[in-house]
């Protein structure tokens, strides 16, 4: 496969919507003739080598699509992969990190470390089963204690809580000026 066809393939692969020949031309800095030749070459390769995808022209724009005969396998993958993925906000990740390093920890202690209210991200972590309550703090005002779960380890790819690296405290101004 030519270098230009490889580049066209890569651009079409990462695009979330169909791409025009002009967009490909502008991105790659070659003429429309070269783009059309690369598209033709790519289409021939994807059609001729029994691939699970093919090149499709949609109203003048180009897209790499999954072949119809792959619909079942793609559908099963999307259904099952979606169940395994966990999307967390930055606040939820910060909250999870505090719990992982300081557990067992109360919500007020989490709030103090983060400097903001952690109720919403904590609720999300509980809902996803990444953290759980582990009793009440005995001293002072009674408060729930939070710890991480086995699912937390699985989601973050950690074998043991002890494997989480220590975070160095840095001055915010230093971070911004770097």
Image (cartoon, rainbow, N blue to C red):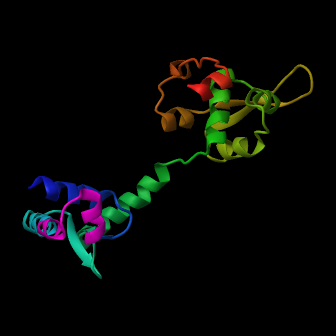
Q: Which residues are magenta?
A: 21-37
Does the segment drawn in magenta span residue 140?
no
User: Outermost residue, bottom direction?
Assistant: 59
The x and y percentages for residue 8 are 22, 60
Q: Considering depth in this image, is 128 or 20 the residue closer to the camera?
A: 20
Looking at the image, which residue sits at the far right? 141
- Residue in the foreground of this view, choosing between 63 and 96: 63
On the image, the x and y values in percent for residue 106 come to 79, 29
Please say if 147 is above or below 31: above
Res. 169 image quadrant: top right
Q: Position of residue 47 (x, y in %)?
A: 11, 69
On screen, 131 above or below 57?
above
Instruction: State the residue at coordinates (64%, 19%).
Output: 170
Residue 13 or residue 137, whichever sits in front:
13
- Find out whether residue 25 is within the magenta segment: yes
Q: Residue at x 18, y 66 (%)?
A: 31
């Amino acid at each position: 496969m030519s270098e230009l066809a490889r580049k066209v393939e890569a651009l079409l692969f990462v695009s979330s919507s169909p791409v025009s020949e002009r967009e490909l031309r502008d991105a790659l800095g070659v003429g429309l003739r070269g783009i059309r030749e690369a598209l033709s070459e790519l289409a021939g390769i994807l059609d001729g080598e029994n691939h699970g995808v093919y090149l499709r022209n949609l109203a003048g724009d180009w897209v790499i699509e999954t072949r119809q005969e792959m619909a079942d396998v793609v559908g099963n993958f999307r259904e099952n992969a979606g169940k395994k993925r966990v999307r967390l906000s930055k606040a939820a990740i910060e909250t999870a990190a505090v719990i992982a390093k300081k557990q067992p920890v109360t919500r007020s202690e989490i709030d103090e470390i983060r400097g903001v209210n952690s109720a919403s991200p904590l609720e999300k972590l509980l809902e996803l089963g990444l953290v759980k309550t582990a009793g009440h703090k005995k001293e002072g005002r009674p408060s729930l204690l939070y710890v991480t779960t086995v699912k937390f380890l699985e989601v973050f790819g950690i074998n043991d809580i002890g494997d989480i690296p220590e975070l160095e405290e840095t001055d915010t101004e230093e971070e911004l000026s770097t």
